[in-house]
Image (tube, rainbow, N blue to C red):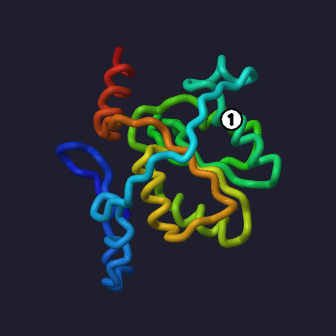
Amino acid sequence: IMRRDREEGFDYPVANPDLCISCGKCENVCPVINPREKHLPLKTFASRSKRYVQTSSSGGIFPELAESVIAEGGVVYGAAFDEDFKVEHREVTSVEDIRFLQGSKYVQSELYSTFEDVGQVLEDGGNVLFAGTPCQVAGLSSFLNKPYENLILVDLICHGVPSPLIWKKYVDYIGKK
């Protein structure tokens, strides 16, 4: 479950006391408590999509990757706005819905059961594309605790994001104008 810090407004994972068996797994996989070894990229690519560069924030490669994964029957997970402009990670299985995941959100997204959902799709043999901030990608990798051939991870360049509380205050302010 998630707990929202009252001062900063960030969400932090907290074990559900009704389900916790005190095994310590959540602390063992936490990328904040146990940072993974840093590795330099083996290869780095710069690219842009002729089809999507005008409708994307950073060159349009994400929708190209998403289309490819969906065309092969896979599932795509990424950040989207809900009806109240909260940012949440969402599952997409149709090319038409990729548009909801396009564009930068610049705020911490709610993950809910995304890690569990990704794990289930992978265990069932499905292909997955997961896009998120570096800390979300590290968290998913730690949660899964093993490599998957059928998983594509896309982490974004991130210098920190504002909290959902700051974002809500901004949306409320704009709504009053």
Mark 1: which amino acid?
A: Pro
Q: Which residue corresponds to the image point at 60% horizontal and 34% vertical from the top-left? A: 45
Query: In the rendered view of the protein, which quadrant contains the N terminus?
Result: bottom left
Q: Is residue 159 left or right of residue 87?
A: left
**On screen, 58 above or below 161?**
above
Q: To which quarter of the image does residue 13 belong? A: bottom left
Q: Which residue corresponds to the image point at 65% horizontal and 32% vertical from the top-left? A: 61
Q: Which residue corresponds to the image point at 70% horizontal and 42% vertical from the top-left? A: 66
Residue 59 image offset from top left, x and y in percent:
61, 24
Question: For the residue labelled by badge 1, is the local secondary structure a helix, a strand or a loop?
Answer: helix
- As drawn, the residue found furthest toward the top would be 177
Residue 41 image offset from top left, x and y in percent:
50, 46
Q: Is residue 49 left or right of residue 43?
A: right
- As drawn, the residue found furthest toward the left would be 7
Q: Residues within 10 Å of mark 1 (few under 14, many from 20)?
A: many
Residue 20 image offset from top left, x and y in percent:
35, 80
**On screen, 152 above or below 143?**
above
Q: Which residue is mark 1?
A: 63
Q: Is residue 94 visible?
A: yes
**On screen, 12 above or below 71?**
below
Nearest the viewer among 150 and 170 is 150
Q: To which quarter of the image does residue 48 belong? A: top right
**On screen, 105 above or below 94?**
above
Nearest the viewer among 167 and 144 is 144
Residue 33 image offset from top left, x and y in percent:
27, 63
